Amino acid sequence: MEKYVCMPCGYVYDPEAGDPDSGVDAGTAFADVPEDWVCPVCGVGKDMFEPEN
């Protein structure tokens, strides 16, 4: 599964790890992360993330 990078702060969402502190289980693809989820580092929305190259 593809990783996604937060453009403002550089946080990398890794689907293999998920974001358990925010209720996103490990193994959750970025497309399946809830729309109201925000970056755990800087608080921006999913629309500020881009696929990691």
Image: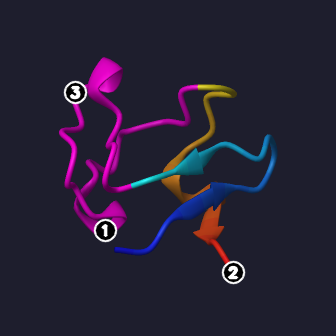
Marks 3/1 in contact by CB < 8 Å: the verdict is no
Q: Earlier in the sequence, mark 3 or mark 1?
A: 3
Q: Is residue 33 left or right of residue 13?
A: left
- Name the N-terminal-most of marks 2 and 1: 1
Q: Vertical placement of 43 versus 1: above or below?
A: above
**Extreme-bottom residue of the structure:** 53
Instruction: Give the residue pinned by disc 3.
Output: 23
Hey, which quadrant is residue 45 in on the image?
top right
Over which residues does the magenta segment extend?
Answer: 15-40
Depth check, front residue: 35 or 53: 53
Q: Which residue is mark 2?
A: 53
> How many residues crowd mark 3 within 10 Å: few (<14), some (14–19), many (20+)?
few
Residue at x-position 63% and y-position 38%: 44
Query: For the residue marked with disc 3, what is the amino acid?
Result: Gly
| Mark 2 in CB contact with mark 1 (< 8 angstroms) | no
- Neighbour tally class for label 2: few under 14, some 14-19, many 20 plus, Cα within 10 Å: few
Q: Is residue 12 magenta?
A: no
